[in-house]
Image (tube, rainbow, N blue to C red):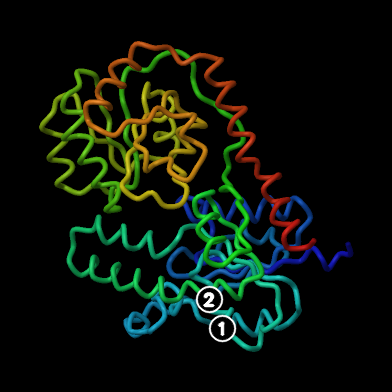
Amino acid sequence: MNDTDYHLHVISFDVPYPANYGGVIDVFYRIKALSEAGVKVHLHCFEYGRGHAEVLDRCHEVKYYKRDTSFWKQLSRDPYVVASRRSEALIKDLLMDDYPILCEGLHTTAILNDSRLEGRKVFVRAHNVEHDYYRLLADSEPTFWKRWFYRMEARKLRRYEPILKKAAGIFAITQQDADYFNQHYGKAVLVPGFSALSRVCSETGRGDYVLYHGNLSVAENKKAAQWLVENVFSELDVPCVVAGLNPPDSLRKLCSRYPHVRLKANLHDAEMMDLIRNAQVNVMVTDQPTGLKLKLMNALYNGRFCLVNDDMVRGTDLGQLCLVAEEPEQFISQIRRLMKEDFTEDDINERDEALKELYQNEKNAQIIMDSIYR
């Protein structure tokens, strides 16, 4: 294999640094792993508020394009997430050579419809089955106009998705997604999520509180926190903590009704990590069984016991490392039991071995390289 075989254009839907939310965490640490494996990454970023990032200059090349977030893009027949990232400057840059291309998400796949790139090897990293993800966002959204937008976007994404037939390959983030894409388009390979996490750093012993954490300005997380406080935490007699970014006033008021429930808002990363590591039980629920929940990964690598509902682990192999409950009574019973148990070195070692099998950045980068170059 000669040197040119290791060049790769990566088109990112956002500037992937700082790596502080699910999608860009996967992009940033995949770029890092590919670069360390010898790939010369030509990174193309759509920019809409995060600014340029010096750390990305470690790539072979970095270029930025302004995302067009004007109202008119919402009227496009194509999904807004795609139409707002269509760029003539990007096409011209890609035409400077014939290196393979990796599109991050369906968001950046407008290039698949450009005849000037016909015959190029274009791969797609699928972070979700996007129309399912947007439909579930709509179901969780209380604001009428946002709910309407998500539903329209879900319909457009479903109609647009067959563009994946033109891709040379699809890298799915969960087995459930890989099965879906193979059923409809073929060419899908499971490549689990990339992250900064490499070994389990959980504390042994016992914590004295239960934790739910997430970005509380996101409708899905706000709904989950509210459900837990009303149906589970309210019935417990141990300290419970809800932590995350920008909680709404309604959630603040709800938590204040219960003396043993504390709300911690807008913590620094180190403070949040301390909360996760020192909790006895990290509780996580969702009604969106899509993609990989990176906050669950964070809790598994850094926390003690993880108690989740089935949708949180659906389509992944992480259920074996968690306790799973569905009804409030099941969550309450499990928490009461877990508060009396020590988290041991054996628990840490078992979790570490299982996660190494699934989530090794180096191994998963090699899967991508094998698909693209061989």
Q: Is mark 2 on a helix, strand or loop?
A: helix
Residue 17 picture location, percent across and down = 53, 56
Tag of residue 225? none
Left or right of 359 on screen, residue 48: left
Q: Earlier in the sequence, mark 1 or mark 2?
A: 1
Q: Which residue is drawn at 60% across and 62% down?
A: 170
Locate residue 266: give its quadrant: top left
At x 30%, y 67%, the residue is 150
Please tell me how many numbered marks the rendered image carries: 2
Q: Residue furthest front?
A: 183
User: Where's residue 305, x and y in %?
Assistant: 42, 24
Whole-number angstrom distance, CA of label 1 to CA of label 2: 8 Å
Q: Residue 163 carries which label?
A: 2
Q: Where is residue 111 in the image (x, y as percent from the top left)?
A: 58, 79
* Circle 1 crowding by C-alpha within 10 Å: few under 14, some 14–19, many from 20: few
Tell me: residue 214, above or below residue 211: below
| Tag 1 and tag 2, C-beta contact below 8 Å | yes
Q: What residue type is labelled 2?
A: Ile
Q: Name the residue under label 1.
A: 113
Neighbor class of circle 2 (other Cα within 10 Å; few <14, some 14-19, many 20+) is some
Looking at the picture, how far across and down is residue 263, in whole percent?
Answer: 24, 35
In the picture, which quadrant includes the C terminus? bottom right
Look at label 1 and name its amino acid: Asn
Q: Which residue does the image show at 25% across and 47% down from the upper left?
A: 222
Which residue occupies the extreme left position in the image?
257
List the single residue furthest toward the right: 2
* Quadrant of the drawing holding the N terminus: bottom right
Give the quarter of the image for residue 312: top left
Element at label 1: helix
Q: Is residue 300 above or below residue 312?
A: above
